[in-house]
């Protein structure tokens, strides 16, 4: 099992989408690359993200990113859907250099690589979101989500 952290705007929709992907074992909503280890402090520079545990024998980083790019606007800076602000930026984070290299290759192979605003950075820290945000759209399917419903449930098993 390996882990990669995906930031694609509001984490509710990203988690609901990613948790159903082939090869994904588990997900956890949280905050990446902030400066504190708590959810109780004011905004500290974090990006809302989803810790994604996956089986590399079943799905590659590149394939995961192909799915991920289906639900984000990769050109947008600090905005996804109606959600605006630095915490809604797009990003790919990992503690493994190989994951970051795979992400950079994935982006650089795209015809629109020069327009992509997705940050690719080492994971500095991860703080799990409070329980009320975990699997939010599974528990409250009518809550707001910036991802269109047809995409949100495209890979639902």
Image (cartoon, helix red, strand yellow):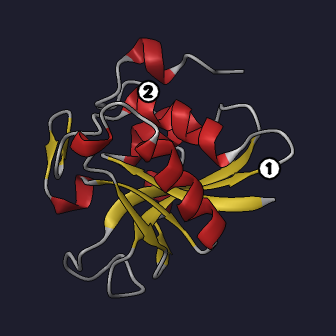
Name the secondary structure under disc 1.
loop
Left or right of 41: which side holds 21?
Answer: right
Left or right of 157: which side holds 92?
Answer: left
Up-down relation of residue 97 to residue 59 (above or below): below
Q: In the depicted view, which residue is nearer to us: 115 or 150? A: 115
> Could you tell me which residue is drawn at 20 percent across and 75 percent down?
43
Q: Quadrant of residue 81?
A: top left
Q: In the depicted view, which residue is nearer to us: 68 or 16? A: 68
Crowding at label 1, few (<14), some or many (≥20) Cα neighbours within 10 Å? few
Crowding at label 2, few (<14), some or many (≥20) Cα neighbours within 10 Å? few
Circle on res. 110: none
> Could you tell me which residue is drawn at 32 percent across and 63 percent down?
47
Q: Residue furthest top?
A: 150
Left or right of 146: which side holds 154?
Answer: right
Query: Is residue 136 visible to us here?
Result: no
Up-down relation of residue 37 to residue 83 (above or below): below
- Where residue 74 appears, as percent x and y from the top left, is 29, 39
Give the CA distance from mark 1 to mark 2.
20 Å
Q: Residue furthest bottom?
A: 36
Name the secondary structure under disc 2.
helix
Query: Is residue 145 visible to us here?
Result: yes
Q: Which residue is mark 2?
A: 70
Q: In the depicted view, which residue is nearer to us: 68 or 34? A: 68
Give the quarter of the figure containing the C terminus: top right
Q: Which residue is mark 1?
A: 56
> Could you tell me which residue is drawn at 46 percent across and 34 percent down?
137
- Where residue 141 appears, as percent x and y from the top left, is 45, 26
């Amino acid at each position: 099992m390996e882990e990669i952290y995906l930031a694609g705007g509001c984490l509710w929709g990203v988690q609901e989408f990613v948790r159903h992907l082939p090869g994904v074992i588990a997900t956890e909503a949280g905050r990446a690359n902030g400066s504190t280890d708590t959810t109780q402090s004011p905004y500290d520079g974090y990006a809302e993200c989803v810790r994604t545990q996956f089986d590399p024998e079943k799905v590659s980083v590149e394939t995961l990113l192909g799915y991920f790019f289906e639900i984000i606007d990769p050109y947008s800076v600090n905005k996804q859907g109606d959600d605006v602000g630095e915490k809604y930026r797009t990003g790919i984070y990992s503690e493994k250099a190989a994951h970051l290299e795979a992400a950079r290759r994935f982006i650089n192979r795209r015809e629109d690589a020069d327009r992509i605003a997705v940050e690719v950075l080492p994971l500095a820290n991860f703080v799990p979101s409070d329980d009320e945000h975990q699997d939010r759209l599974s528990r409250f399917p009518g809550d707001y989500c910036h991802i269109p419903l047809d995409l949100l449930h495209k890979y639902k098993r």
